[in-house]
Image: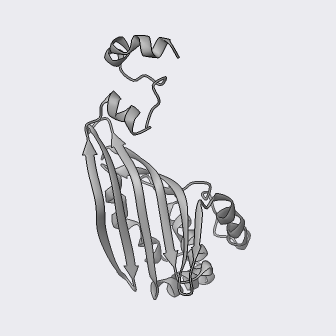
Amino acid sequence: MANLSCASGYMALTTATKEDLKDFIFLHVLSEKNAYYDTTIDGIEFLEPTIEDYEYLDVRIDEHKDEEIITDDSYQVTFMFYANGRWNFENNLTWFFDCLKRDYNDDAINALRDNLKAQTIKAFFDYTDYDDGCDFIVEQKILLTYDKGTVTKDVQESSETAFTVDALLEKDIYDKYEIVSERWLKEHYDEFANH
C-alpha cells in the first residue's frame, strides 16, 4: 500500500456555465464517495445519487465557494479542498476527471456525464502537500484541462522542502503550540513558554 500524503489548498473549477459546474461537482462527489485517495471539496461531500441532493447542491456551492467569476463564456468558482494523496497529491490528479468515464447505472446521471464529456473543464489547484514518512512538503500550482476526453496537466509552480518542524510552522501546517519535536521544544522553550 502507498503512503498517504495530506494536501489542502484551493481549487478553481471553470466550466462554460453554472449548471455545467454543478453537474461536474455532483459527478465528482459521487465518484469520490468511497475513494481511499480522495479529493474533497470542503463542505461538499457525502452526496447521494438522488434528485434531492442534486437540487440542494446549488445551496452547498453558494455556501462554500470562496470566489465566483462569471464571464460571457465561462463560470468559475474557487473552493477550499483537502485530499489524501497516493504517495503525493499530484498522483490524484491523474484520475481527477475519471468521474466523466464512469457508468452511474442511472440514465439521468449518465446524461449529465455525457453532456460534460463534450465540454472543456479546467481545474486549477494551489496547494500544500506533505508526508512525514517520505520527508517532504510540496507547494504546487497545477492547471488540469479536460477537453472533450483529453486531459492535460500544466505544473505552473512547484517547490519542495524537507519535513522539518521549522518548515511545518513556516507553511502553517502546524502552529507552534502543536509541537511535534522534542528537540525543537528544547531549542525554543522560552519562546514556547512565554505564549
Q: Is residue 180 above or below residue 37?
A: above
- x and y percent of residue 178 in the render? 47, 25
- x and y percent of residue 94 in the render? 33, 65
Is residue 53 shown to the viewer in this render?
Answer: no
Q: Indicate left or right for 75 with 84 as reference.
A: right
Is residue 155 shown to the viewer in this render?
Answer: yes
Q: How is colour applied across the structure in the image? A: one colour
Residue that appears at 40% across and 11% down: 189
Q: Indicate left or right for 119 with 109 as reference.
A: left
Q: Nearer the viewer, residue 12 or 51?
A: 12
Residue that appears at 57% across and 75% down: 21
Query: Residue 158 is drawn in which quadrant?
Result: bottom left
Q: Nearer the viewer, residue 109 or 138?
A: 138
Residue that appears at 30% across and 47% down: 2
Residue that appears at 43% across and 74% down: 122
Q: Is residue 45 above or below residue 7?
A: below
Query: Residue 153 is drawn in which quadrant?
Result: bottom left
- x and y percent of residue 107 in the render? 60, 84
- x and y percent of residue 52 in the render? 74, 69
Q: Is residue 108 above or below residue 162?
A: below
Q: Indicate left or right for 14 with 141 as reference.
A: right
Numbered disc total: 0
